[in-house]
Amino acid sequence: MNRKNALAAAVAAALALGSVTVVAAAQSTAAALPAAAVGDPAARAGAGFQAMTADARREAIRTADRDAPATARELGLGPEERLVAKDVLTDADGTRHARYDRTYSGLPVIGGDLVVHLGEEGEIIGSDFAHRGAIRVAGTRPRLTAADASAAAVKHARHVRNAKAGGKDSTLVVYAVGKLPVLAYRSTVTGAGETGPASREAVIVDATSGVPLDQYELHQPVTGTGNGVTVGQVSLETTQTGSGYTLTDAAHGGTIVYDAYNSPQSNPKQNARPFSRTTNSWGNGTTSSRESAAVDASYGLAKTWDYFKDSFNRSGIRNDGKGAPAYVHVDNGLLNAFYDDDCFCMFFGDGSSQNSNTPLATLDVASHEMSHGVTAATADLTYSGESGGLNEATSDIFGTMVEFSAGNAGDPGDYYIGEKLNMPAGYMRRMDNPAADGTSLSCWTSSAGSADVHHSSGIGNHFFYLVAEGTGAKTIGGRPHTGTTCNNDTFGGIGKEKAAAVWYRALSTYMTSTTHYAGARTATLQAAADLYGTNSQERYLVSKAWAAVSVGTALPDPGTGTGTPTPSPTPSPGGNALTNGSFEQGTSGWTQSDDIITNSPLQPARDGSWYAWMMGYGTNAVESLSQANIAVPSTGTPKLTFWLKVATQEYDATAYDTLKVNVNGTTLATYSNADASPGYVQKTVDLSAYKGRTVKLEFAGTEDTYLSTLFLVDGITVG
């Protein structure tokens, strides 16, 4: 038995001990809820999760930590990897969902988080990985020093100007957001940006070359303007002291609202002190009283807590019963509000002359910021690219749901974001028609990951509106809503409560830090199946809503067995029978089993910036990239040509990892790790046997248990 077969047998034996099934995020599995839960609203309470006391939750996390070494072995992780339990959720049927972070040789792994799904007896029944498979890097001794990394971070900062950083601001990590993990530094730089002169940005650079791998704002800002105190006369939970009262909400985790007294963003707590007074009456409804903005914030945060508790049995941001402090009157002329997970707190500016100096503490802004904390405590969606858009969309979604649930007569529920902020357009964002603001995206495109996260959030917002309300014009909360789609489809919604339950379960159970829009579709379809059944109308309409924003296609209608037909691709110009053979239009024309088509800077494209990255996991995996309805020319000698680059960690000529070219299910060519090359090499496959026929082309990748091989494909033509 050679070293590969011996290792494969050992791993197979280890996996068999736990009957484990490792499933990628795009192919996640989980046990469905009991049949009774499908039609019983009471059984579906809390998005399928069972209520847990704080003590029970802490014990569940301790148990997950104790089980972490065995879990890592069953999942096939490497000896340098460790799992650290982050949270545990339990379904009504006893199914548990343990969320872990990963370390590698003691280093934090960015993109290493995962969720393990466990049956009632503790057996692993599925898993979702931000990075599938074991983490491996060449070594953990960086070529760059921390000071070098800080200098590179300053050079490559995109979100702040006049950036500064010191060596102590750079931390060595393993960056596993792409398919190939690399040793990197995560640096924090400060400078002038959207959140003011002390804005902070995380810059991740390769620890060998200093090449930037990612950049994102650390303060997740709501950029906009507001119109002042909006909640009117409300009841507040306060605390009585010996001499009076403070804005300390003991009913909601001891949440305290502070007056920042215009402390600068660089140190927003510098002058802060709690609000207190001798009587239990606060504010006067105008900005002439500093208490008025505090009333807005306290009320909004309490309503947000109530919504998550009543809807999902979640006690506060981190589900630990603890409230996060809030600070109003931050800085001078600050047209912003933001949540900071580092300090577990929220900050609200007073606005600027652009919005008549109105504090940014309205109901949907406060709930938006607190929801950022919930995202950080669950999927921890990276605040850049498509995952950043999903992060912002999540806060808009739950901010909207809190507005509906609060039932405030002065601020009725609608699908407008920041409509009480006195924006020039009358709102900050619209979920029913995101593109109405001139910058937000209503439909997914291949460039969505390059858009500002506040603009790409429109895709998720639009999806949520359509799955909740359906298509067609409506008046909601006294405001017009259009409900248009990207594919001219028409359908009804499942209701906002069901839609929110699907989103919360997807966020807390299936999404990870690197989830993109295609992954969000997969996660919400699984969540809908969990809550309402695989063949439910709810799950079908979730797929319809995603198709309506150009993410995937609709599932077959469980009532009729029909779905949205997949249109035949239009051939590209220049004699190529393929659609989008260069991938420069993203995924258009292609069907992929995973996140294959990419413009990641971690690998080069042959031409342009987009290419197909197949395999490279270093563990058992399969992938498929295909296109159907290709009309092979009926004259001449038709052929398939494409550019292929193969890079491998294998060190002999045995074909352990392969890429097959299949036409109508027949393999016409096979490439492997033995075909490794320093650059792209053009390949040609004869298609004479298919002259004049319509065919399906597939690139099928297979990788074995140990050592990675990646196949990069670009410039595909049929002619």
Image (cartoon, rainbow, N blue to C red):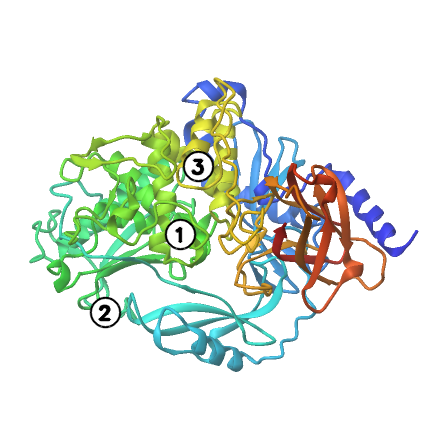
Q: Amino acid at mark 2?
A: Ser
Q: Nearer the viewer, residue 89 or 685?
A: 685
Closest to the camera, between mark 1 and mark 2, is: 1
Q: Write down the residue under mark 3.
A: 547
The CA span between labels 1 and 3 is: 18 Å
Sequence-first disc among 1 and 3: 1
Q: Nearer the viewer, residue 297 or 514?
A: 514
Q: Residue at x 17, y 47 (%)?
A: 420
Q: Secondary structure at mark 1?
A: helix
Residue drawn at 69 percent across, 40 percent down:
691
Q: Which comes before the other along the chain, label 2 or label 3? A: 2
Measured in 3D between alpha carbons, the distance from the residue under mark 1 to the one under mark 2, in whole angstroms, is 30 Å
**Could you classify mark 3 by the number of other residues whose Cα lies within 10 Å: few (under 14), some (14-19), or many (20 or more)?**
many
Q: Is residue 243 at all visible to an observer of this figure?
A: no
- Which SS class for mark 3? helix
Q: Which class describes the residues within 10 Å of circle 1: few (<14), some (14-19), or many (20+)?
A: many
Three-letter amino acid code at disc 1?
A: Gly
Residue placed under numbered mark 1 in the picture: 389
Point out residue 359 in the picture as x, y percentages from the top left corner: 17, 57
On screen, residue 52 above or below 5: above
**Amino acid type shown at disc 3:** Ala
